[in-house]
């Protein structure tokens, strides 16, 4: 009995050992899988700033005054406000998620500030006139800053100018342009402002300084010029205040982004990079002949819903495109199973051909085969005809301009197949022509060889004979039965009355009897 108990206890011990081994093995496998699968890094701890918000005289700002933090014109704060009569505030500034090596985890969108970015503090969100504090800070994850913030000087506070409209693809070509608006009651000098775009990896891409003035409550067109140009399928444009600095300068004397617009195409959009694409949200990209614009009052809520698309200003009433199919012609016949080229010309009163969209198809009976679908600027397409003989095949082309005006055209043609008899005749004709060609070549070669055989081979040049010079034979002498012609000196018979050579008459000069 004791042995049995011991045996049973021993058996239980072995079972427990096997179970523990399996659990250890599973734990090792789970750890290996966890290490093998990359995991996203947790978002960084926001930076905290607390203190008192004070006006230019040092008095606390009113209860409920919004306190915001900005990096490159984007609000990355948690949206707090002054919480008591002493102007107390506490604000969190979100950071951008990065790996342990410092690389961005979200390369297609910037979610917050990066390490070392300058953080600007403001008593508002720049949707309207906004006071900016003197103080700035360098963003760092998890940092806790305790500092009072003071509204900067009036001389270094920007006016609430806005980007009112953007034309990235003018219908008739030429420079891209934007409209600025001044919602204030006074004239504003643009010498204190410039336009700037982000580019991958930097807040400070190409820029364009502004000049002149902008009237009160009026828009102003500004043509863009190199090096500043917009990517039509997606970009971020900023209106920046050039801080004059000086005593009590806002934002530590640094420049301030007063308005920012991010736009992106819904299909094929290109604003997919940091720091251009942010949490601000994207307005629709203005296609050719369109303007992305705010309303007439230049309303700003820091939302893409502030913008809508409209027809580019200054364009004439739109007319449908013109379209002429050049090939095929009506009733033309093509060989079956051959490559058939359809070609056409088109134009538009506003848009370039490259902006026109083309659809093309071919119909045989009740079957329609699409050949082109929304092909920009296409003026031809090649179709491989089926190996059938059929009449009444229809080639159809539609052309649509960017405003939706449409023109269509069709041509009817036939397909034919060569009969076996026709193919046989063609082969025989080709064979006869080939035989004549061969016969001509052989005959020419034979004549050439015969000419070579008849001609003796050329020998070496013979030297002139040696000895006395050869004397030419003397002219024949006149005898009793001959006489000499006094004109050409030819010897003729004595009884001849005329020289047979020159026709001289021997009776000339004789006295008359």
Image (spheres, helix red, strand yellow):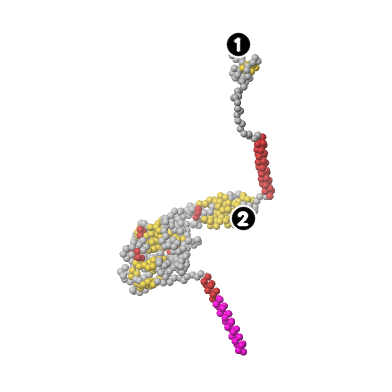
Give the main secondary structure of the magenta stretch. Answer: helix
Q: Position of residue 427 (x, y in %)?
A: 67, 47
The residue that label 2 is drawn on is 364
In the image, residue 498 sits, relative to residue 117, either above or below, namely: above
In the image, residue 279 sits, relative to residue 345, either above or below, namely: below
Q: Position of residue 344 (x, y in %)?
A: 55, 51
Q: CA distance from mark 2 to mark 1?
A: 112 Å
Graded by Cα atoms within 10 Å as few (under 14), some (14 to 19) or many (20 or more), the crowding at tag 2 reads some
Q: Is residue 494 visible?
A: no
Observer-nearest residue: 435 or 269? Answer: 435
Q: Is residue 369 visible?
A: yes
Task: Give the quarter of the figure containing the C terminus.
Answer: top right
Observer-nearest residue: 207 or 6? Answer: 6
The residue that label 1 is drawn on is 512
- On the picture, is 156 further left or further right than 401? left
Q: Which residues are magenta?
A: 1-26
Q: Position of residue 381 (x, y in %)?
A: 56, 53
Q: Residue at x 60, y 55 (%)?
A: 363
């Amino acid at each position: 009995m004791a042995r049995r108990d011991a045996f049973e206890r021993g058996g239980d011990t072995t079972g427990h050992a096997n179970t523990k081994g399996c659990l250890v093995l599973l734990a090792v496998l789970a750890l290996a899988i966890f290490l093998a699968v990359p995991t996203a890094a947790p978002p960084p701890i926001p930076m905290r700033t607390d203190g008192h918000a004070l006006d230019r005289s040092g008095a606390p700002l009113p209860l409920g005054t919004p306190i915001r933090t900005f990096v490159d014109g984007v609000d990355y704060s948690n949206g707090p406000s002054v919480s008591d009569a002493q102007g107390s505030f506490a604000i969190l500034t979100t950071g951008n998620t990065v790996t342990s090596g410092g690389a961005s985890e979200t390369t297609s969108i910037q979610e917050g500030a990066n390490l070392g970015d300058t953080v600007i503090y403001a008593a508002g969100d720049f949707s309207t006139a906004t006071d900016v504090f003197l103080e700035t800070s360098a963003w760092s994850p998890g940092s806790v800053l305790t500092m009072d913030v003071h509204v900067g000087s009036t001389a270094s506070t920007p006016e609430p100018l806005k980007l009112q409209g953007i034309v990235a693809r003018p219908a008739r070509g030429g420079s891209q342009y934007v409209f600025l608006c001044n919602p204030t009651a006074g004239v504003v000098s643009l010498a204190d402002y410039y336009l700037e775009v982000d580019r991958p990896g930097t807040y400070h891409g190409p820029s364009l300084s502004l000049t002149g003035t902008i009237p009160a409550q009026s828009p102003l067109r500004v043509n863009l010029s190199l090096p500043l140009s917009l990517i039509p399928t997606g970009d971020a444009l900023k209106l920046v205040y050039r801080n004059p600095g000086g005593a009590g300068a806002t934002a530590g004397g640094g420049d301030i982004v007063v308005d920012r617009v991010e736009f992106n195409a819904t299909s094929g959009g290109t604003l997919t990079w940091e720091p251009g694409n942010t949490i601000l949200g994207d307005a629709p990209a203005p296609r050719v002949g369109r303007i992305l614009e705010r309303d007439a009052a230049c309303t700003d809520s820091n939302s893409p819903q502030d913008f809508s698309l409209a027809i580019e200003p200054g364009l004439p009433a739109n007319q449908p495109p013109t379209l002429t199919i050049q090939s095929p012609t009506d009733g033309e016949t093509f060989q079956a199973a051959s490559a058939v080229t359809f070609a056409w010309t088109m134009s538009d009163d506003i848009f370039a051909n490259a902006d026109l969209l083309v659809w093309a198809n071919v119909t045989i009976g009740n079957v329609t085969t699409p050949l082109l679908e929304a092909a920009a600027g296409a003026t031809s397409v090649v179709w491989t005809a089926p190996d059938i003989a059929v009449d009444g095949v229809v080639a159809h082309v539609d052309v649509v301009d960017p405003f939706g005006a449409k023109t269509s055209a069709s041509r009817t043609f036939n397909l034919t197949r060569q009969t076996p008899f026709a193919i046989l005749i063609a082969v025989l004709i080709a064979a006869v022509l080939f035989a004549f060609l061969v016969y001509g070549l052989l005959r020419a070669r034979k004549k050439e060889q015969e000419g070579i055989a008849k001609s003796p081979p050329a020998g070496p040049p013979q030297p002139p004979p040696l000895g006395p010079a050869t004397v030419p034979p003397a002219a024949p002498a006149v005898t009793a039965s001959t006489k000499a012609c006094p004109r050409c000196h030819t010897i003729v018979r004595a009884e001849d009355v005329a020289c047979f050579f020159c026709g001289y008459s021997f009776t000339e000069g004789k006295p008359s009897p």
